[in-house]
Image: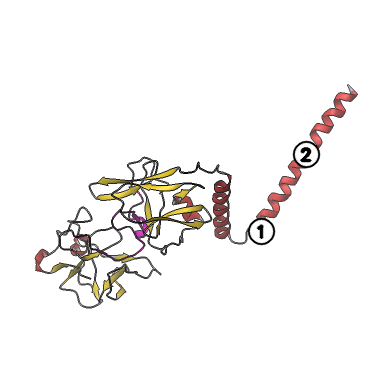
Amino acid sequence: MPFSRLSAKRLWLPVLALALTALVVAACGGDDDEDSEYATSTAAASTATTAASATTPAASGSTVNIAVKTIDSGSYLAGPEGKALYVFTKDAAGKSNCTGQCLQAWPPLTLKAGESVKADAAAKGKFDSIDTPSGKQVTYNGAPLYYYTPDVTASDVKGHLVGNVWFLARPDTASNFVVSVRSDGSPKTPYLIGQTGMTLYTFANDTPNTSNCTGQCITNWPALLVADGQDPTAGPGAGGQLGVFVRDDGKRQVTYKGQPLYYWQGDKKPTDTTGDGVGNVWKIAIP
């Protein structure tokens, strides 16, 4: 019996010491969290980095398959599990600006060591990768690619238009540019398009840097907008000066050569140009 009690004590002492150590570490950690947002960002990046480093390297020659899916509103890129991929207009070409809590909602598409991208033939852009805290993130035409956590099924595209800064990655137009040029030889090209890949228009009744489209007009012709603090950027071929003005509703609308830019609700897919000539006052925006 004495031997049994002594053995029990020897077993419990290390456990007690470990528990006390854990309490001390937890208390110290709480004192060091001076900036919760920074702490969240660091934790997310650390977790992602640890996960990436702990993952077994892929076999040499293995591939990450990127598909092109088509729905009524157009085509988009999808990752290996069939889920939609997105681009973030606050990123720069070859650089991700999504960190911290952003990464929890928008996990990046990454490559394991030894993996490469194999894409659908309809994705004619250039795939590459960049080094990030999450690992090697896949880019398309320089734009880092992401998933959206609320997309549960392979048919979900809930991330499109979120915050007016997240958009489906289109195989023909995906980029970080706010304004790009469609020049693929389709009818009426070249003309300006927005981040959605949809055609942009100008309104003859506007004046430079001022919109006269309000009420039902702005419902039918949604303005091309940018978020607070975001400057519009132009893709190759869009050589005119971009600008921003604040509408009466407080939103920031993009201009091209001083002309406010709009989408048209009647266009259903990226190559549609059905707004051209409406009322003899709406025209496709030409670079």
**Residue beneath label 1, please?**
32
Chain part drawn in magenta = 158-185
Q: Position of residue 219 (x, y in %)?
A: 21, 60
Quick one: SS at disc 2? helix
Label 1–label 2 contact, CB within 8 A: no
Please report the residue visible at 57 percent of the width from the left and 49 percent of the height from the top.
47
Residue 238 drawn in magenta = no
Vertical position of residue 268 compared to residue 208: above or below: above
Please state which of residues 19 and 202 is positioned toward the viewer in this rendering: 202
Please report the residue visible at 22 percent of the width from the left and 47 percent of the height from the top.
72
Q: Main secondary structure of the magenta part?
A: loop
Quadrant (top left/top right/bottom left/bottom right) for the C terminus: bottom left
Disc 1 residue type (three-letter): Asp
Quadrant (top left/top right/bottom left/bottom right) for the N terminus: top right
Give the color scheme: rainbow, by chain, secondary structure or one colour: secondary structure
> If you read the primary sequence from the N terminus, does the residue marked by circle 1 or circle 2 appear first?
2
Residue 122: image tag: none
Quick one: SS at disc 1? helix
Please tell me in which quadrant of the rendered image residue 9 appears.
top right
Q: Position of residue 126 (x, y in %)?
A: 36, 56
174 horizontally vs 284: left or right: right
Disc 2 residue type (three-letter): Leu
**Residue beneath label 2, please?**
16
Q: Position of residue 206 (x, y in %)?
A: 19, 74
Please tell me in which quadrant of the rendered image residue 45 appears.
bottom right
198 horizontally vs 167: left or right: left
Please report the residue visible at 34 percent of the width from the left and 64 percent of the height from the top.
177
Q: From mark 1 to mark 2, how far is it between C-alphas?
A: 25 Å
Vertical position of residue 16 compared to residue 278: above or below: above
